[in-house]
Amino acid sequence: MSALAAPPLPQGLPLNQATALLRVSSSGLRQQTSPLVDETAATPLAKPDSALQQRAAELFRAAENDLHRHTDQLFARLMIVQWLAGIAAALWISPLTWIGDSSQVHVHVWAAILLGGALSGFPAWLAWQYPGLTVTRHVIAVAQVLTSALLIHLTGGRIETHFHIFGSLAFLAFYRDWRVLATATIVVAADHLLRDLYWPQSVFGVLTASSWRWVEHAGWVLFEDAILFVAIRRMLQEMSEIALRRATLEGSNEEIERQVVERTTELSRTQAELLETSRLAGMAEVATSVLHNVGNVLNSVGVSAELATSKVREFRTGSLKNVAELLQHNSADLPAFLTTDPRGKMLPDYLLKLAVHLAEPQQAILQEMEMLKKNIDHIKEIVAMQQRYARGTGVVEVLSVADLVDDSIRINAASFTRHEVNVACEIAQVPPLKTDRHKVMQILVNLLSNAKHALDQSEGDRRMMVRVTQNQEGMLEIAVIDNGTGIAPENLSRIFSHGFTTKKMGHGFGLHSGALAAKELGGTLKAHSDGPGLGATFTLTLPLEN
Amino acid sequence: MAQYSQTAGTTGIPPAHWPETSRAHRHSGQSQLVMFLHPRCPCSRATLGELEQLVAHCQGKFSAQVWFIQPEGMGEEWVKTDQWHAAASIPGVQVNVDHSGEEARLFQAVTSGQTLLYDSEGGLVFQGGITLGRGHAGDNPGRDAIESLLKQKIPSATSPPVFGCALGWVNNQKECTACQP
């Protein structure tokens, strides 16, 4: 029995060793009786891996059970086919028995229907209801060889029909269970023995057969069995090898899956960090723009303060003091001093001229103060706008595209004025945009700032255009077009990469974070340039509803 | 089923000499085998198989004729079954229609598969069946006996039973009492 049992699985190799062993010795596996065991014994590092062995055994049993169930179902169908074939054979060969011109149904027809039905029906039912059970396949084995006997009888003992037995044995070998073949062989031998004893002509075709002739017949069956046993053993061996390979692969897969999960988690964390960094970088860009513009306004404030100071310095406070001292000195007879003293007589004219002289810087100071107030209001406005956008992160609002564009230009307005950039807008009639105000603002401020930088380095007329349209897919397109330095073709493909910049003081965060923000909003950010010196167009495409 | 297979038909007592009134032509100087078959008897398929073997084993030692019974009122198409064609395809075998069982009556053949062998002088040397059971092919004493007679001239001491359907040319009851050996 043990000689035909499944070969033992290797006494546990560590996963990597088992994998390597299978890889190295795969070609030799089929040529050795138990190559895996031999290899294991030859490997000094081999240690028992009971988990691998246990898993391989489980897989082997599962495959074996699956095979038994499928073969049971195969036989269930075969039984039905054989039953119908038996009936057909009976109807074809011996449908009626005759006395002259009168006839009745031949007994073979009834035998094919009833006996054949019993022989096929019960095992087919078992295979249907209890597939995979040991008893099922043994019942099938018995029924199959008895069906052979019935078919032989129905065909009038034709020697050709005896081949059904050998075909049946080959079919039964599908179970890869030598015990099933043993059961079938025992039934064949017993059938021949009993018929040899009591009804030899029914099986051997002669009235008196040798009492050992059944051995000859059984011997041929055993001959086929021997070949099938060898085949079964090999197949079981292959099944156990496959089970071991699968167990090893499962182990490798689990390890790979674990590593993938680990790496994915790390990647997600890194991506989240990158996103946050980019978001902060984007905010920093906006903040930089704000500060830049505030700085520009503060320049004006400083100039105004300087002018006011210089005007104040122009006030002739010494002259006033001299007049005051002269009046104090002549206070005893002030009317006489004013009417008779030559200095007193000149004093009204002098005071009048002094008043006129003081009024001029006062007016200038007032004008500068007015300018100062305006500039301070401008700073307040810029800061308030920045605060408004900084607060709104993640909040989806219904926005006017025109207002968004206008705000983003105003944040940069002082800078544009200072750098003599002429900004124009073309805003088509588009529906309101439902999106995250802060993210769109971040992108636009960055694009306008970049365009301004590109224009700074170019000579001649500095023009910038913001064009808003709705494309054929219904998406909103905001294009920032400049006639600045343009982008070299080799830089177009990496302009959105993290860390890539062409600015001397740049960080390479702005466009990268802008592209990420556009993606988060369900849109895209694309760049186009015909080359250096030919300007550039950055197009932000957004769905109208996010 | 076993009982059915092993139940032989009744056997008549054929004439010891070739009946002169028979339409069957006897070739003088040669052993003559006469076989009577029911054209639709499934058991007789095995008998034809054994006849085929006989012809193969004893080629040129005898001539054979098979008579297919045609009951009263049946047309020729009723007779010309696959068995008719199987018999006709055996080399050297002459196939005939026995109208209303006249020849069977002459030779006292009652069961399909009944085989008679007359020697070159017209004397009956064998009578019986050449199968072991109803419709069962295989070695059998009837065929062995005929082969021995034809090859070694050893007379047969047995009359093997005939396994087949009744030819039906006589009432069964009468036939059973009249023809049992």
Image: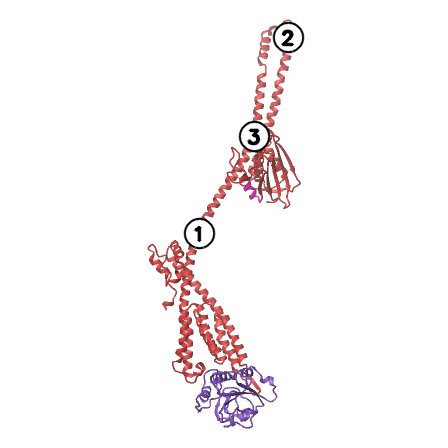
Chain colours: A red, B purple
Would you place residue A497 above or below residue A104 in this image? above
Disc 2 chain ID: A
Residue A176 is at least partly visible in this image:
yes
* Amino acid under disc 1: Ile
Mark 3 nearby-residue class (10 Å; few <14, some 14–19, many ≥20): many
* Amino acid under disc 2: Met
Tell me where residue A88 sits by quadrant: bottom right
Q: In the image, is A215 to the left or to the right of B122?
A: left
Same-chain check, marks 1 and 3: yes
Q: Check the image and name the residue furthest to the right.
A: A429
Q: Position of residue B145 (x, y in %)?
A: 45, 88
Q: Magenta stretch containing residue A398, yes or no?
A: no
Q: Position of residue A210 (x, y in %)?
A: 39, 82
Same-chain check, marks 1 and 2: yes
Circle nearer the viewer, 1 or 2: 1
- Label 3 vs 2, first from the N-terminus: 3
- Label 1 vs 2, first from the N-terminus: 1
Chief SS of the magenta region: helix
- Disc sitting over residue A256 in the figure: 1
Mark 2 nearby-residue class (10 Å; few <14, some 14–19, many ≥20): few
Please tell me which residue lies in front, B88 or A508.
B88
Would you place residue A234 above or below residue B147 in this image? above
Residue A178 is at least partly visible in this image:
no
Would you place residue A326 above or below residue A499 in this image? above
- Disc sitting over residue A346 in the figure: 2
Tag 3 residue: A294
Residues in magenta, as a range: A515-522
Circle nearer the viewer, 3 or 2: 3
Please tell me which residue lies in front, A151 or A399.
A151
Q: Secondary structure at mark 3?
A: helix
